[in-house]
Amino acid sequence: MNSGRSVFAQLMDYIPRYQFQVCVDRYHGNSYVKSFPCWDQFLCMAFVQLTYRESLRDIETCLRSMPTKLYHMGLRDAVARSTLADANERRAWRIYADLAQALIRTARDLYLHDPFGVDLEQTAYALDSTTIDLCLTLFPWAQFRKHKAAVKLHTLLDLRGSIPTFIRMTAGKVHDVNILDEILPEPGSFYVMDRGTINFARLLILARASAFYITRAKQNLQVHRRYSHPVDPSTGLRCDQVISLTGVKTAKDYPDSLRRIHYFDSETERRLTFLTNNFSLPARNIALLYKCRWRVELFFKWIKQHLRIKAFYGTSENAVKTQVWIAVSVYVLVAILKKRLHPDRSLYTILQILSLSLFEKLPILEPLTKPALENWGVVPNNQLNLCDF
């Protein structure tokens, strides 16, 4: 019998406990708390994300069904659903937001030199948002339409490793373009955005901060072509131009020159027009960078399918944000585990294996290692025959 630590406890070792305590002290998370500190709350909610629990009653039932294993999980006692609900309701969600940012910094260092399909030395980000529908009766603070509630997750994704570096959760009615005001531009980095975030006054701020952006042009954009560069039509490029804006408002908001690239995507048979303030990168690389923007769409699809961020265990804004940030922490934690242990598995497969082996007492790498199928021969039949005829 393996007398070591459980897989769940080994996974939680990747959480920097000192940094976690700093986050708790910063927002006085354990003030007046006697029996259920923030660390226990995080363990419970991480268990929820890893095992796909449906409700507070489901969480309570699962934890109470294995009281002898809670100690090896890191919990001192079974957790009542009212205790967990109160913790999610009252303790500052910023504790877990700061913890997620600490994990994100670790993950970005690990994925710093990973390729992502484009030969680029600078950092590239994809900016987008996804909407999570809610019930207006239960979540009145997140009113979106007259009879509908929703929240938006605005995410800035590092294309190397698909690590979210910036997440802001707002009510559904907040437009994507407003998030540009909250992003601190990194000089030399690329920001890839859809045309829903086009605001030339804000794009000028990115350009003046020595950052580069790539977005799609709207059909009614008024421009004046100043110069055309030669292109190779066999690569899908149709034109590479230097332009200036001529609209009454746009020319005032963005007086600098822009680069416009027309590209034909043979896979989807679509014609795309890109705008950027980078004049040195090859035009095809601009098109490929925009194509990488779909990684943020895949990120949203992945976390909605494999983490608990569409059904919430509390109805207050604090409870919802706490659950979302702990879900992000779990995602980044699995990404860190994959990079440090190098299992030949996808994030999805690692998450599925962990959900079944959290309470097993074996080295965490063992269930994540693929069996050597090529070494499997014919299994000898050593069982005695019941009859000799």
Image (cartoon, rainbow, N blue to C red):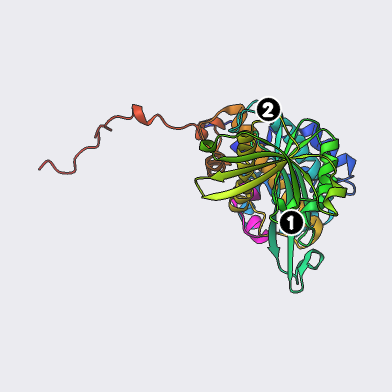
Q: Is residue 326 magenta?
A: no
Rendered view: 20 above or below 141: above
Residue at the (77%, 30%) spot, across then down: 188
Position of 80 with respect to 64 (left or right) is: right
Q: Is residue 138 visible?
A: yes
Q: Which mark is residue 152?
A: 1
Residue identified by numbered label 2: 112
Q: Residues within 10 Å of mark 1 (few under 14, many from 20)?
A: many
Q: Residue at x 25, y 32 (%)?
A: 380
- Image coordinates of residue 307 in percent, x first then y, are 63, 50
Q: Secondary structure at mark 2?
A: loop
Please tell me which residue is depicted at 62% across the width and 40% down the height of the picture: 239
Q: Position of residue 96 (x, y in %)?
A: 78, 44
Look at label 2 and name its amino acid: Leu
Question: Start and end of the magenta stretch?
Answer: 48-60
Does the image show residue 67?
A: no
Q: Residue 364: horizontal and vertical position, in percent?
A: 57, 32
